Amino acid sequence: MLEQMLDRIECDVLVVGGGVNGTGIARDAAGRGLKVVLCEKDDLGAHTSSASSKLIHGGLRYLEHKEFRLVRKALREREVLLQSAPHIMWPLRFVMPHDAGQRPAWMIRAGLFLYDHLAKRDFLPGSRGVRLDRHPAGAPLQPAFRRGFEYSDGWVDDARLVVLNAVDARERGATILTRTMCGHVQRGPQRWEARLADLHGRRIDVSARCLVNASGPWAETFQRMAVGTPSDVPHALRLIKGSHIVVPKLFDHPYAYIFQHPDGRIVFALPYERDFTLIGTTDVDFTGNPGDAAIGADEVGYLCELASRYFAQPVTPASVVWSFAGVRPILEDASRSASAATRDFRLDHDTNGAPMLTVWGGKITTFRKLAEQAVDWIAPALGHEAPAWTEHAVLPGGDLFGAQPSKRSVLEFETWMRGRQLRYPWLSQGQLLRYARSYGTRMAKVLEHVRGLSDMGPEIVPDLYAAEVYYLMTQEFAQTAEDILWRRTKLGLHVPPGSVEVLERWMRKEAS
């Protein structure tokens, strides 16, 4: 690949950080004709961006903190995103059991009415009250919960969202360098000189007209390295750890839950990977290296206790089959609690020499808008005029019924799936669903020379064939078994112990 042969690169924009904001900015800028390089010290989306609650949502709970502007912005983006990548994002109905000891019903109804009407809904149904004794979502709950509320939001495979942005950026001309650290930058009047190094110690020198700091929880550290600590910065990052647990599935219906805790916080319980339930998140102030974040026993206990308060089946720490934690960079504000701190973003523009843009905060639902606003500033700063374009473009694999985003792709995904079933009759229903949800129309590339399972190559670990691994390695930047089993797919939840080592040996052998 071209990226492996470059020792010096001249570009318009160097993006540091391969999370959802960094890859979104790289994609937008490349699509406007700018020459872009993105470097990420680990795998794409290896940290915060793959440790979210997997939701495309307005943030119902932010209404309590009067974050109306943020909620409106996120609700507007919700349907834009759902239509841009209907294979990795889809609508999800949430049920909120009403606890008479918590927020009063009138307040919840008022909040949901506002949530329904803050932004236009084109195809998502509105909220309604429900009788849980007559609703499928009521069956797994404690019998004391008799009434509740139902509303719409969306689900996203967050790690794949990051990768697809990077794939699109590369196809539009960007150079994507994973496992490549930006160790030094020097600013000149017109250009930045950066020194990158990969895992093998190979140095890559980059000369860029603009530097973008999209390093998430490391943004403050990187800014100090690049320009020191300017005295006029009016804010700092507050690092908040959010943790989730995964347990064997607690319910057999398609609804998700939003639960209220007596301390005022909320926790989601979501259908996950067919056989599991995902429960989270916590909000805990964090210090230290964000790369070392891990769930604490107290967080596991907190999530289990809250889930057991609502579900008839007790959830205990022994039930947990997997957990993950990520550090979210939140803009410091006057909020006392981590859960009340704002999830909005801010873009800082520094023109004291060659331009630099720093991304502070943000949430996954608003990444596209953040990227658009970032490039709206970058392009003119470099004397480049090009209109915004991503609102009307699909992500790779999202063109189910044409190149333009459409609600048809969201509402008729099952119809499209039936067409794939006729094309690939030798795939099991489970395989077909996984390929369709992971790759969308690009499953045709994964299966390009395949006419049956015998053409897929060896089954390296259960349900993972060589053809898919080759695709992920050559087209989606995967370099390790962890990349494949836990971020490109979630097969890590389904394969037996030792599968990481088996796949790692196979990949090393193929690469040698």
Image (cartoon, rainbow, N blue to C red):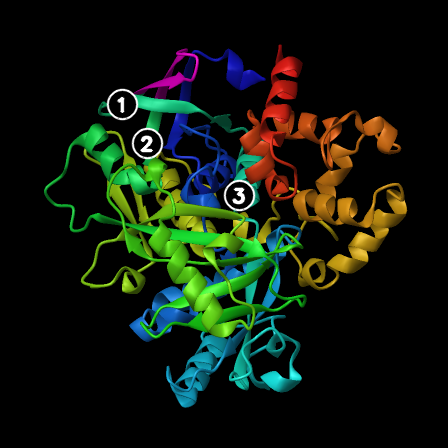
Judged from the image, the secondary structure of the residue bearing numbered disc 3 is helix
Residue type at mark 2: give it: Leu
Main SS of residues in magenta: strand
- Based on the picture, tell me whether residue 201 belongs to the magenta stretch: yes
Q: Residues within 10 Å of mark 3 (few under 14, many from 20)?
A: many
512 left or right of 280? Answer: right
Q: Label 2, label 3: how many angstroms apart (C-alpha)?
A: 24 Å
- Residue 142 position in % (x across, y down): 54, 78
**Amino acid type of the residue that numbered disc 1 sits on in the rendered structure:** Val
The answer to which image quadrant residue 215 occupies is top left
Pointer 2 and pointer 1: residues touching (CB < 8 Å)?
A: yes
Please give the range of residues in magenta. 194-207
**Residue located beneath label 2 in the image:** 211
Q: Position of residue 243 (x, y in %)?
A: 40, 52
> Within the image, what quadrant is residue 466 found in?
top right
Question: Mark 2 or mark 1: which comes first in sequence?
Answer: 1
For the C terminus, the quadrant is top right
Q: How many marks on residues?
A: 3
Relative to 230, is 220 on the left or the right? right
**Which residue has dot 1 on it?**
185
Is 317 covered by the magenta stretch? no
Which mark is first along the chain, 3 or 1? 3
Foreground mark, 1 or 3? 3
Residue that numbered label 3 is attached to: 159
Image quadrant in which the N terminus is located: top right
